[in-house]
Image (tube, rainbow, N blue to C red):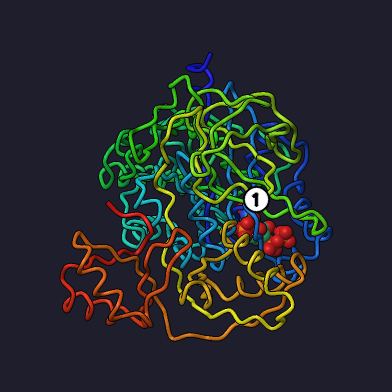
Amino acid sequence: MLSREVKKRRTFGIISHPDAGKTTLTEKLLLFGGAIQKAGTVKRNKAEKTATSDFMEIEKQRGISVATSVMGFEYLDHKINILDTPGHKDFAEDTYRTLTAVDSVILVVDSVKGVEEQTRKLMQVCRMRHTPVIIFINKMDREGKEHLDLLDELESELNISVRPLSWPIGIGSTFKGVYHLHKQKLNLYSPNKKSISDDYIPIEDLADSKLEEHLGEKAATTLRDEVELVDTVYEPFDISLYRSGYLAPVFFGSAINNFGVQELLETFIEIAPEPQARSTDTRLVDPYESKFTGFVFKIHANLDPKHRDRIAFCRICSGKFERNTFYHHVRLDKKLKFASPTSFMADNKSVVEEAWPGDVIGLYDSGNFKIGDTLTEGEIMNFVGIPSFSPEIFKELENTDPFKTKQLEKGITQLSDEGVAQLFTQNPGNRKIIGTVGELQFEVIQFRLLQEYGASCRFISMSTSKANWVSSDDPEALKKFLHSHASKVAYDKEDRPVFLAGSQWDIDYALTNYPKISFHETSEWD
Ligand code: G4P
């Protein structure tokens, strides 16, 4: 049973620079998968959420999606779990954390704009984790970049080898469809297509005159020449290189016109990896192990400000999870059971009795969880690979209402447990420094502290631009460094020392003077 359930699961993240078409593609994947009946559901959800909560007003005002959502559906005997991510750069940490819970990724690129800032950053995280990536080049109905130039751009800017699995015929006003190189069939494009299935014409041999019949003389000749070129320029597709994160297969399509989506989905379930083994601080955990294990990668505030409970998103790594069963919360050394674990299926959520490796469940939480927490059947171990990254903007938190000090303390601790921002403290907790990757997060914090905790604060700018965790094999050397840099050292939530640097230069300088100290960009190091 366990083996069957693991084999049928595909858990992936969908990522892009904002506006490339991530929401549209997600929606079309759900539509093709039969999980929703009509287009507009995903977008409508986005809109409704923003309308029902004050906090989400921030999201609405800026037209961005703050929350990461999970959507599951069944397709051709597979259980697909899509983890959507916010594209806006100020919420990049949320996206990075979501990427720790997936086994592969679909990256959406706009054919007109090509590689953009967030595309680059997100790929960097995928490369670091060797996550297999499929690239979907969207908006082929627009006058985009020349195909081969775009592929070159992907390779050089994203630092990954690519291999087109389909080849576009024309672009923009001359776009006629794609030729599936892998399966040797032609998929003809028709704009504003309402139906959700692709119509294929099998063409086993490109010399077939059927090509002229469907494409016309000129386009048929161009296609033959280009396919020949592609086959000489690119090595044949090697699935093991894809699975180890070195090669990204590329598809072309137009999500809004339902074009190329079915093809993407079908190839995805064929080549994308099933749930993979995951590392802990003691050993590697295989999904086929009978005992349940999982970790929390995201905590979502309750959208209703009257209730302060939260939803912890848990990725199941091994065994079977069951409702109302006691599991071990390793960090707290505490037994917990969950009466209403939730699964997310497209546009609704429901209580689940059981869940399997690869699944993501929502656990109602009244403050027990922090990001990275591990649940087991009793074994003492912690999943690793869910690091905090060095924030980019630092501000000191100042309490502006002395009567609400306790509320502020509690609020800021909970918000940092949720991962809204990182909290560093100095002078045994008296000075609080907040680190984020974007300005927007400060607004979110200020707003939520007031709405949910009744605490008010303001932020004072700092010259810090980098936080590096410090360690040393020599305790004396570490002590000396921390002592002599007391004004620039703060402590993270786990009480680990962090060096607050004005620039990379400060770190390089300290490295020269303190050779026994190691500096780390993330909170996890070997
Ligand atoms: P995101 O989640 O990555 O931010 O992108 P989203 O899907 O919201 O798409 C961004 C815009 O691009 C939307 O237009 C969407 O309709 C459009 N789009 C998506 N796929 C295609 C495509 O294949 N071809 C073309 N031409 N456009 C596409 P919008 O005007 O911002 O929003 P809306 O009014 O359509 O909702």
Residue at disc 1, secondary structure: loop
Along the line of sight, the residue nearer the viewer: 258 or 146 = 258
Along the line of sight, the residue nearer the viewer: 379 or 56 = 379
Figure quadrant, ligand 1: bottom right
Residue 210: in sight, yes or no?
no
Amino acid of disc 1 = Gly
Residue beneath the point at 57% across and 76% down: 439
Q: Position of residue 55 (x, y in %)?
A: 75, 65
Residue 156: in sight, yes or no?
yes
Look at mark 1 in the image and give the residue it sits on: 367
The correct choice, above or below, for 393 with respect to 56 in the image is below
The correct choice, above or below, for 100 with respect to 278 in the image is below
Residue beneath the point at 66% across and 60% down: 65
Q: Determine whether, in the image, residue 11 is placed left or right of residue 199.
A: left
Q: Position of residue 140 (x, y in %)?
A: 55, 54
Q: Position of residue 514 (x, y in %)?
A: 18, 74
Mark 1 Cβ inside 8 Å of ligand 1 = no
Q: Determine whether, in the image, residue 360 is placed left or right of residue 374.
A: right
Q: Position of residue 487 (x, y in %)?
A: 38, 83
Q: Determine whether, in the image, residue 249 is placed left or right of residue 515.
A: right
Q: Determine whether, in the image, residue 170 is placed left or right of residue 412.
A: left
Q: Residue furthest top?
A: 1
How crowded pointer 1 is (Cα within 10 Å; few <14, some 14-19, many 20+) is rated as some
